[in-house]
Image (cartoon, rainbow, N blue to C red):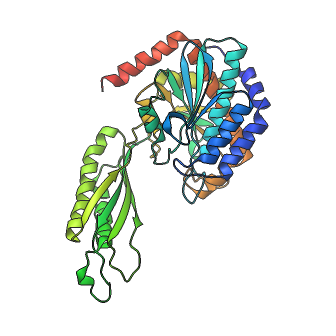
Amino acid sequence: MTVFYEDFSKVIARHENELWRVNQEIHSHPELNFEEVHAHNTICDFLESVGYSVTRHAYGLKTSFEAEAGAGGGLITYNAEYDALPGIGHACGHNLIATSSLAAFIATAEAIQKNQIKGRVRLLGTPAEEGGGGKIELLKAGAYRGVDACLMGHPADRLLVGADGLVIVPSMALVGAKVTFHGKNAHAGNAPWLGQNALDAAVAAYTNISMLRQQVPPNQRIHAIISKGGDKPNIIPHLTEIELFMRAEAAADLQDMRQRLIACCEGAATAAGCTVEFSWLPNYKELRCSELIAARFLQHSQSQGLEYKKSITEGSGASTDQGNVSYELPSIHPVFSIDDGDASVGPHHPLFAKSAGTRLAFEASLKYAKVMAATGLDILLDKELREGLWAEYRKKFESQ
């Protein structure tokens, strides 16, 4: 295990002002799935300003990008996320994910150049994690072909984590859908019997789903919203929509739940005299973290004076399209802690969005970046480790 902690610190310190600017630009301009134009341009402009060649709009996605440094040897990829949530901005802290991966990329790239290390490091801009499945589209386009390992990290609440971070954090598989009910308009006061009420179908479906929740295993989740309920109270709604997510510990467990959800919606549509159609979102698979990468990461975190827990027995209840990446190649997705003030709230809360924009959170992301860079460089320096990663992957996963 070769370490370059001092070099990493110097490189990141030299770029710290610009990294802070990038972090704040992303945080103060929250953008939704596949619309992260400002974040995409901000990161690409910075990389080009410090001498890196960048492929903008990479792999056919408007807000993806790719930068690479080094030659020959192995290839590692750091994933950068930068999409936000509707209404609550960067309440998942993706500005910090982008910052940590950007800092790790520069630190690794400069170590490769300075020490004439054989190997390549790639920074991949991965849009639309919040339900859009950007990494799934990148996988289809071949963005991870030939990559030996993929690394990234996610911020979490320090009070909930109880340490500087967690190395192995289970996530849940997820399948989502937009369900559209079609009825028939009529005047709600004059002749309501001439209509077929699509809102009745949506409400009945939501009620069916609510009753189903008590009949699913405790390690599964269902949540839904009525995203379109009609146009005006005096018009029988002819079209309504429900958006729903289903989660389970493993992707294989979702099939039965999916069929039960379909039955809930179809039964409601029939009862209301309506029809129903389903538009399925990309399926997010559960994380399959590499134990070998996790062990190296834990060693480096300890060497840098950080307290990381190796793993937890219970999952976070969250899902990520990084799970799909972990199905294809050796991967890791730790969480690093940030302070969110007096309340322990965690992601997807307005207070977490506020905390994600603080200097303290930014500094935590840079500390994480140094550990990730050290782990990534280890993989490039050690051919036997790379071979071991793939042997571990094949033994654990290819037979499943």
Res. 337 visible in picture: no
Q: Is residue 236 above or below residue 154?
A: below
- Tell me what residue is drawn at x 60 percent, y 55 percent: 89
Q: Position of residue 333 (x, y in %)?
A: 52, 33
Q: How many callouts does the rendering have? A: 0
Question: Which of the two residues, 337 or 12, is positioned nearer the viewer here?
Answer: 12
Residue 158 in the image: x percent, y percent?
A: 62, 44
Q: Is residue 116 left or right of residue 314?
A: right
Please tell me which residue lies in front, 391 or 315: 391
Question: In the rendered view of the protein, which quadrant contains the C terminus?
Answer: top left
Looking at the rendering, in which quadrant would you find the N terminus?
top right
**Residue 98 x %, y %:** 62, 39
Using the rendered view, name the quadrant where residue 337 is placed: top right
Residue at 76% across, 32% down? 15
User: Residue at the location (66% across, 47% down)?
Assistant: 26
Say whether residue 291 is visible. yes
Q: Is residue 145 left or right of residue 362?
A: left
Can you give x and y, in whole percent of width and height, for residue 92 in the image? 57, 48
Residue closest to the eye, 175 or 218: 175
In terms of image quadrants, where is residue 300? top right
Q: Quadrant of residue 278?
A: bottom left
Q: Is residue 120 above or below residue 346?
A: above
